[in-house]
Amino acid sequence: MGYPTNYRYTKEHEWIDAKGDTATIGITDYAQHELGDVVFVELPAPGTKLVAGKTFSSVESVKAVSEIYAPTNGEVIEANTALQNKPETINSDPHTGGWLVKIKLTNPAEVNDLMDAKAYEAYIEEKQKEASA
Amino acid sequence: MRYLPKSPAERKEMLAAIGRKSIEELFSSIPEAYRLKKPLNLPGPFSEAEVIRYFEARGAENSIGYSSFLGAGIYSHLRSVVTDAILQRGEFLTSYTPYQAEISQGTLQAIFEFQTLMCQLTGQEVANASMYDGSTATTEAVLMAERLTGRTRVLVARSLHPEYREVLRTYAKNSGLTVEEIAYSATGTLDVSGLKSALRDDVCAVVVQSPNFFGVIENLEPLADATHEAGALLVVAIAEALSLGLVKAPSEADIVAMEGQSFGLAPSYGGPFVGVVASREKFVRQMPGRLAGQTVDQNGHRGFVLTLATREQHIRREKATSNICTNQALCALAATVHLTLLGREGIREMAEQNLAKAQFALSQLEKIPSVKRSFAVPFFNEFAVELPRSVKMVNAELLKSKIVGPYALGSAYPELSKHALVCVTETTSRGEIEKFVSGVKAALEVPL
Amino acid sequence: MTDKIKKASRHTSQNEGLIFEKSSVGKRAFELPPLDVPAVDAGKSLGPYYRTEGVEGFPEVSEIEVIRHFTRLSTWNYAIDLGMYPLGSCTMKYNPRVNEFVARLAGIATEHPYQPQELSQGCLKILSLLEKCLLEITGMDAITLQPAAGAQGELTGLLLIRAYLQKRGNPRKKILIPDSAHGTNPATAVIAGYDVENIKSDSNGQVDLAHLRDQVNENVAALMLTNPSTLGIFEQQIPKIAEILHAHGALLYMDGANMNALAGITRPGDMGADVMHLNLHKTFSTPHGGGGPGAGPVAMKRILEPFLPVPILVEKEGGRLALDSQRKDSIGRVRAFGGNFGVLVRALAYILAYGPGVRQATEDAVLNANYIRKHLEGTYDLPYTRPSMHEVVFSDAIQKRRGVNTMDIAKRLIDYGFHPYTTAFPLIVPGALMIEPTESESKEECDLFIDAMKSIAEEAEKNPELVKTAPHATRIRRLDEVGAARKPILRWKAGEKSANDEVDTHPRKVSTPTVPTC
């Protein structure tokens, strides 16, 4: 699966798709693969404030829980409640259908500090090299 | 030594196979200064007969041959010998925690049945696979309420078992929880107006026991209403689980914390027992302890697995809902076997016998003019009476007739000195009750 | 199945349903003696609290159905009585039957903790003797038998440390925990109100002393150390570790889960540990029973004694024993009623059977582990090569090259008639195989285990699919844990389909099972 070039990425394997002063956030294909079959997603309610670098959600598989970190500052407009009944969407469609939250960006420029698709792909290649070393 | 399956020759052979000359070499990584030069100073070794003799001698120094009217959180009930026949099967007794589901289906299905029985009894939607006991189950229920509400104040009925309250305080001190007690009213039930005035939007849980420590059944509906209005959760603790055979299930509760000792577990000087946390399905991810869930294998056959393990310490570590690992699985099995033996009719009949015998004892005691019933509300198998003399003194007299008398409430409730908590179960015969009552009468007539 | 599998046998395959599915109205399994007092109208007596419908859904079956039901269920379990559990740090040793017998004796099983203490001298003597024995074994000064399990013992130990430091003015903020530690350690530290700071292991899998020196300061309350470590390797630097901690006013907590490598050989109290817990259901043979009950006594040095949980066992004039609850500095109670007395009885019976000879059990345990290590070295990757004590940790690095991991090997071991070893723990060894045979295993059983592991390694090379799809010989195949977690079904409900109903025979995709530890 490729990494959409118009998204930005974090070291904790979140993606953010910014459009003007709103954005959609999810976890990457790499993250869902590491996690395994997703069984449960904990999502914040609309209105919740996101603080860059702090956790705002968690995604659970049978054997692990992944804390999800806010890539930027913002406020939740909508959470993907369809994931309550079909958490597996994160596995099958991590970059679109598996979105976690839609937010209002406090400062849209923050997105530019994050990795682009190329940088992220290089980053995960490094990680995979480390793992098999 | 009979537990060690090695002959001297085999030990030699194995040492040779690993290229060692002596067993001491295998301990060379322990600094010399700390290796013991002498055997430990321990009694034994005892043959099997000597082990038995030792414990028989200890048993003879306890209360064999006495009848007892003690309850106060531990209850003597009939236990079928079938329970031990099942418990003593090596496949149950000596098996491990069922992490490897394919070879632990016996344990897992039994846990699933236990969880079901607990839900049926308590009227709740989910129940866990056990906690250590009622006191820690109550504490875990409070911690669960804290996680669910994000609040840190706890209102606890003073009529909750004194030791349960002590345990809660020990845990609360380190979790940033403040615990306040709500008094009981003249009827022995929770003072609702006292509760209402203490309730604010910083309360995570209201904890009440029913039947409470005085044996009195609480009216949960107004308590639940007041609690929920403040956005808090109602935790109902149950120490005498058999009461649920006749008493309405506490479905008003958000979380039930129960002690299951009454179901097939001997008093055993305080343990091991079995605690349960039961709650609503929507709270399940905040529930502590193991959970067995139903699923299918790759051929579509029904099977059971431990599930929602991400709540637990071995995955979540610091963020776990509890640190519990080993629980009370075999005790939960005892309760499961016991309850399936009793069945729907048996639990009702056993509970009815308790009710009848306790009422009989009360009516006989009330014939003694100076003895007064403490609380004039419905009870199950425990009730408090007020005596004209100290309970300690009366119990000292009863002891001479080989009767272990009731719990002196004054030891935990100074305002209730001279009140005695009498417990009567189906195991107490009419003759024993009558002997007890005449013993009390005689004790009260002893010249001072 | 090949002729290399000497032990495997099929589980009996009756489709035993849930007890609720066998229920029908009017059956009874237990009868009570007749009521000898006047009957009471429960509805009148209890008024609005009366449960009019009884307990809905409660099963109604006969005695023979109960016996058959649970007997059949039991045949689906593996158990120590059947064969080895090579589970690391679990110490699955033989559960002596005399322990069961004495725990059930009249006067032992029947006592109420609130009965007069003069009528409980037998119970108190048992507690007193067990205390003395455990103090002798651990080299400590004081002990509490109250905690219900290891995790509760850990909590008690940390609360003792907190109380001690608090009394000196500052409870401090952090507990240091090695990255190889059991999950209960960090979970417990948080409950005790502390932050957890990880301390890395060095290349030998031991506590990295340089890091420790850096990390220990006036904010650190204690280090929680397992010794031998979860790698089965003795922490040789433990006296130095204690020194560094003590120099900063911090304490050393020892997780005693691996005491089976030390009992009778050395004593944690002599090596600088300030407080430790024991797992009676590990080292002291009390039965696991499918997950408990256990007991987790906590032994400590004199400095922590004032903070002991109440009640405390004391000796009065004339040798009479009593329980004393008046201790102003006590941390309070961690549970009601004093302790898992029935478990304590079993542990004492075990100690009495061995006496000073308990050393032999430890020696045999360490011998067995080293014997297995020697025979599997080379076949399986051994990441840490320091001498092993009572357990050895391999990794699946060699088998991984063929796509076979530790979980697969563990599942294939079931086909050979063994319970799996501990998989994927400790966390510092990726793909770990943690093996602890205990002293209860004969040379024969060890040899069968070694043969099985060697055979599986060969299968991993030549026929990896066989291993990856194991187990093949069990009544139930790999279970769908993902489905169980997505839509949890945690109880039976009336109207549900029975297992005996038509079964869907289409094979389903099942995911890799969960990571268990001991």
Image: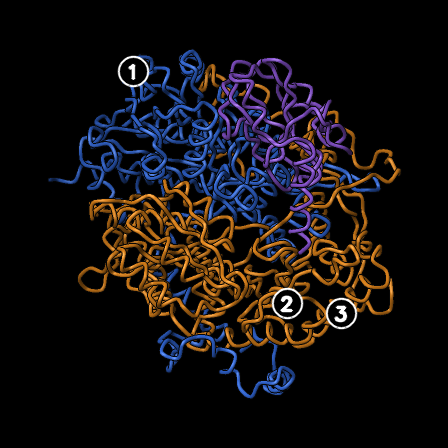
Chain colours: A purple, B blue, C orange
> To which residue does mark 2 refer?
C382
Q: Is residue C62 visible?
A: no
Q: Amino acid at mark 2?
A: Leu
Secondary structure at numbered mark 3:
helix
Q: Residue at x 48, y 22 (%)?
A: B253
Say what secondary structure mark 1 lies in.
helix
Judging depth in this view, the residue of B337 and B231 nearest the camera is B231
- The residue most toward the left is B448
In this rendering, the answer to whether C366 lies above or below B153 is: below
Residue C420 in percent (x, y) is at 68, 58
**Image coords of residue C380 (percent x, y):** 70, 67
Identified by mark 3, the residue type is Lys
Same chain, marks 1 and 3?
A: no
Labels 3 and 2 within one chain: yes
Q: Which residue is mark 1?
A: B194
Where is residue B50 drawn, in percent x and y? 45, 73
Q: Nearer the viewer, residue C132 or B240?
A: C132
Q: CA distance from mark 3 to mark 2?
A: 15 Å
Which label sits in the foreground, 2 or 1? Answer: 2
Mark 2 belongs to which subunit? C
Quadrant of the rendered structure where residue C386 is?
Answer: bottom right
Question: Can you identify the residue that label 3 sits on?
Answer: C454
